[in-house]
Amino acid sequence: MTQTITVIRGDGIGPEIMDATLHVLDQMNLGLGYEEADAGMVALEKHGDLLPQATLDSIARNGVALKSPLTTPVGEGFTSINVTLRKKFDLYANVRPAKSFPNTKSRFASGVDLITIRENTEGLYIGEGQTVSEDGELATSVSRVTRKGAERIVRYAFELAQKTGRKKVTVVHKANILKSTSGLFLKTAREVAKDFPGIECNEMIVDNTCMQLVMRPEQFDVIVTTNLFGDILSDLCAGLVGGLGLAPGANIGEKAAIFEAVHGSAPDIAGKGIANPCALLLGAAQMLDHLAMPEQAERLRRAIVATLEAKDNLTPDLGGTGSTMSFAKAIASRL
C-alpha cells in the first residue's frame, strides 16, 4: 500500500536537498508517493501567500509532510511559517536528536547520543501578548503554560524513551525563578514520571543544563522542556555534533507530523549544488520511524554513517569536494 507524503521543497537550498533526499528514498523502494506543495517565498511569488490553503489541505489529507527550509520575510509583518504550521496542526512535540557522527567537525568525536523533546505550542516562544508602549520605553510578552500542554509533552518524552530503550529523562526548567510557568511544568512532570518507574527521571535548571551539555553531554539521554528553552538547547546540542547540517527535526501531533531539516535556507549557496543533505535525510529517517518502518529508518542512518566514514563525496562543509547529489548517490549506494 502506497503512503503519500506532502513534499515541500522550500526556499534557497531547499529544492536541492529535497531532490537528493527523494533520490535516496526512491532507491529504498518504500512505496512512498509524493504530493508536491508550496510554502515560503516560492509560494508567495506563485500564489501571493506564504502558506497557501492548498498546502494546508495537502498536509491535513496525508497526515505526513517532509519539508525543506522555508524563508519568512524579516521585518515585514509576516508570521513565522513554522510557528503557523505548529499551531494549525497542533504539532505539540518537537523532537530533535543529536548524535555523534564520524569525520565531522565537532567538539565531540563520539559519546553524544541524546534527544531533545520540546513543547511546541505554548510558552514564551509563540509570542503571545507582545506589546510595545507608545513611547517605546516598555515591551511586554506573555508566557502561557498549561497543565495539559505540560502533561502531554512530558508523557510523550517518557513514552519515546520507553519505546526506544532509553533509560533516563531529564526535565529542564527554571522553576526556582519562574515559579508559576516553569513551576507548573516541573510539578506536572513529577506527576507523569510516577507512571514510568522503570525510567530514571532527574531535574535540571536550564542554565546548569547548558553547562553540563558542554562539559559532559554523555550524561544525557532524553531531555524534555518548554518551548523557548527547547529552542535554545536543541541548537546547542546540534553544535556538539557538528552543527545544524546534521540536525533533523520532527514536529508531531495527534493528526499530522512534519519532518524537516532545521537549518536555514542558505541563499548564499543556493543553486551551487554544494549543500549538505544530511539533515533532511535524517529527518526522513525520523519520518520512517513515524510510519512504522524502523528497520528502514535504521538502514538509512547506517548508510549515512558508512558514507561519512568512507569520506565518499562529502560536501564542502564536511571537508569534501562532492556535490549535494553525488553525496546522496554515495549514500544510496550503501543502502
Image (tube, rainbow, N blue to C red):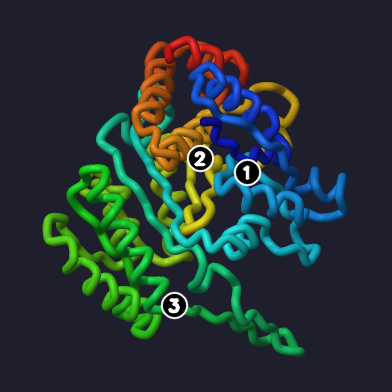
Quarter occupied by residue 8: top right
Q: Nearer the viewer, residue 200 or 290?
A: 290
Q: Amino acid at mark 3?
A: Val
Residue shown at the point (70%, 41%) measured from the top left: 10
Residue shown at the point (68%, 27%) measured from the top left: 16
Q: Is residue 65 left or right of residue 107?
A: right
**Which of the numbered marks, if any, corresponds to residue 264?**
1
Q: Secondary structure at mark 2?
A: helix
Mark 3 and mark 2 lie on one chain; the one further toward the N terminus is 3
Q: Secondary structure at mark 1?
A: loop
Q: Amino acid at mark 1?
A: Gly
Q: Quickly name the residue at label 2.
A: 244
Q: Quickly name the residue at label 3.
A: 145
Location of residue 129 with respect to 127 vertically, above or below: below
Residue furthest to the bottom in view is 134
**Which of the numbered marks, if any, corresponds to residue 99?**
none
Give the image location of residue 274, x and y in percent.
64, 23
Location of residue 40 with respect to 20 vertically, above or below: below
Quarter occupied by residue 126: bottom right
Q: Number of numbered discs present? A: 3
Q: Which quarter shows the C terminus? A: top left
